[in-house]
Image (tube, rainbow, N blue to C red):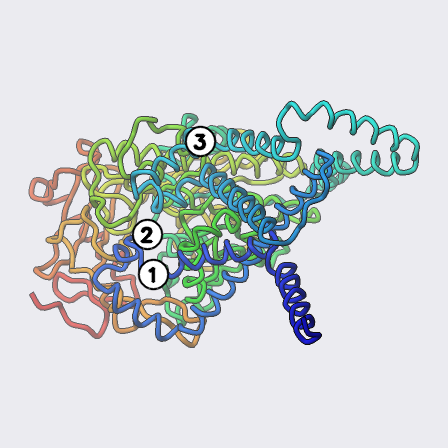
Amino acid sequence: MSLLGRLARTKVTVDRELFSRIFLNAPVVGSLYIGLLYLSFVLDPLVPADQVLLGRDAKEISDYVAIRYASDIERIGVMLGLFALAIGAALGTIALLLLVLRDRVQGRVPARRTGLKAATIGLATVVGLHAFALLLSMSKWPQIYAARFWSAGGTLASIEVFAVDGIRTRGLWIALFCALVLFVFGLPRAWPSIARRAVKATGRLRAKPKASLVLLASIVLAIVAVVLPRGDAGRRKQAAASPAKRRPSVLVIATDGFRADRLRPEVAPRLSAVAARGTQFDGAYVEIARTLASWTTMLTGLHPHTHGVRSGFPRWEQSSSPIDSLPARLAHAGYKTGVFCDSAGEGFARVDLGFQTVQAPNVSFTSVLTELAIQRSLPLLPFIQTTPGRAVFPDMDRWGHGADPRFVADKAIDALRKLNDEPFFMLVFFSTTHAPYSAPSPYHRRFTRPDYGGPFRYDKTVVAGIPIMPNAADTVHIRQLYDGAMASVDDAAGSILDELTRLGADDDTIVVITSDHGETLFEHDRWHGHGDHLFGDESLHIPLAIVDPRTTSPHHDKALVSGIDLAPTLYELLGVAPPEHMEGRSLAGALRGERVTSRPLFAETELLLGMNPGLPESLTFPALGLNHLMELDIEHDSRIVVRKDAFDHTLLVRHRMVRDERWKLIYMPTPKGVVYKLFDLASDPEELVDVAAKYPDEAERLRTVLWSWMLEDPLMTRDGEFLVPKGTHVPAK
């Protein structure tokens, strides 16, 4: 062979060796595997759930977003793609280390770490590790995977049932441990020889006392780091040593859609036990059963038509207006104020309510796009649905299916540990009890029947082909899922209360247990949710318990009170000057045993976001399509806001109501005129029979009271039988 031929052959050999070293190894094939797996999912078209949620505007909205936000979509895709490659490389590195450990333990001649055989073994190990991670994540958060597995039926559904309700989390860890033992140590017949080598290695280590001491010290330090509680444990000692009486702090524990009838030991043992130590207001209601408007009302002591936040999607001119709130005044008085929440609490990032620390989901539209991309990235979910993963992708907090209350509780506990003995006002707001009622494991099975095989096994799924109105068995199961979600919140809240005690702050902290609204759960075919109609008590009635350690008169107060009364009450309990004008009243006297008198309560609906089968079409205006109701505020982070030309319409079509201890009157505008319904709550607490014709005097009395309240709205006026925005006309019949 000529010299030139030998050189060419040598070059080819070198190139092959270089290629093998660079590409044919476990970390690289791991990256390629997870990366390609990620691409196979994100390149899918709209999944059925997207089409159901977007309704008739799905294609138009999708086309607009694809064009207008093409660069953002590309950036999000690249970011998730790089994360996929990093996860694949990490799994590949773990695979490589396992192979090295196996060779060392079994005394094998070290195998090549590159080449086709090494890459194949590495890939197989990565596939196994990723499958374990997916099953483990599924066993903890079945609701995240339900649409892709349980709803698909067949083999995929069986896989989820096996992971979640069969082998479960503990079984998966045991299976992994056994698999790793067999992988590293081989079959049991090889273990005696491994043990003999280990004894020899121990003897060699004893001959090196310094190395032995270093190893022993490292083990002891590792155990101490794991066993000892984290954080500053000095607050308890400091509080006990300080003779000065500190100003009381406030901890508000709330969860979205917390029904008043669920504050009981069977569902929420920790919270009900705390509530029993204070004053429980059994007749507490909110004025608007949607999150942002309700919290703004509760933290200002003002009606929604006074503070101006009328929906969860306020326009910039509304959300940027200064709000004189309880957290703002407490911050000015020297309190540390903070709100900690997940998906349902994004409104706290929309409106400045005076909190110094706001840990809430981002509200920009790019965050929405990131959330949607994460939802489709099934291979990455096991790694994103972790504390480190959420730190990399904080937009995971937006996704209601992933709303595990433990993540929120951990943030609140971390904030408590960082306090340096300052008084604080902390609002911890959980979202797990919001639809789709996706309780993490094991709470999803706490109240449900194991033999349930309907479409809502793990959550109230919204997928094409599933009936909008569930049957009787489905309804029972969904309510049980809700109770499981409530139980998960109860345990998470209990961990916060335990930390409060450990830090020695429980003796001077007022604890408030409440909610932004209740939740309708298919009572009398009224569907589920909140804020769409005013029938029944379920969505307006909330728990309200105030526990002040300085008072010792636990009792129930039956008077009708409103969420609007919370801020005035806390101002008085804390001794902080309130605003000159508040429309709520202080209930602090009730904590001292004083009698509280009932007052008429008012409420209104909010935006009608699509159809609601529990609301008869004859009792409302047709819902606007999303394209006609919402728009993107390009100048302010591309936030989703109510269209300016639709805002007046949203005020016009709202139902409004007034109630006292016996009667409830609902005002409902329709294209054919205004409909009033009167209910006798004494004989008809379920509100099934309209008695307006039977009791015309009561109907007229309450109509007068209701109109007096409605006309306090500075944006509205009366035009015949309608309440209409100023400057508009009565709708044509």
Residue type at mark 2 is Ile
For the image, the number of numbered tags is: 3
Q: Amino acid at mark 3?
A: Ala
Camera sees residue 316: yes
Query: How many C-alpha atoms fall within 10 Å of the one at disc 2: few (<14), some, or many (≥20)?
Result: many
Going 46% across and 58% down the picture, which residue do you hit?
36
The type of residue carrying mark 1 is Arg
Circle 1 residues within 10 Å: few <14, some 14–19, many ≥20: many
Q: Secondary structure at mark 2?
A: loop
Which of the marked residues, 3 or 1, is nearer the chain's N terminus? 3
Is the residue marked by circle 3 packed among few (<14), some (14-19), or many (20+) residues within 10 Å? many
Front residue of this view, candidates 181 and 566 = 181
Callout 3–callout 1 Cβ contact below 8 Å: no
| Residue on which disc 1 sits | 310
Task: Say whether marks 1 and 2 touch (CB < 8 Å).
Answer: yes
Closer to viewer: mark 3 or mark 1: 3
- Give the number of the disc on residue 268: 3
Reading the chain from its start, which is encountered first: label 1 or label 2?
Answer: 2
Place of residue 46 in the rendered image (x, y in percent of width and height, measured from the top left): 31, 59
Choose between 704 and 640: the one closer to the eye. 640
Label 2 with label 3: CB-CB less than 8 Å: no
Q: Label 2: which residue? A: 288
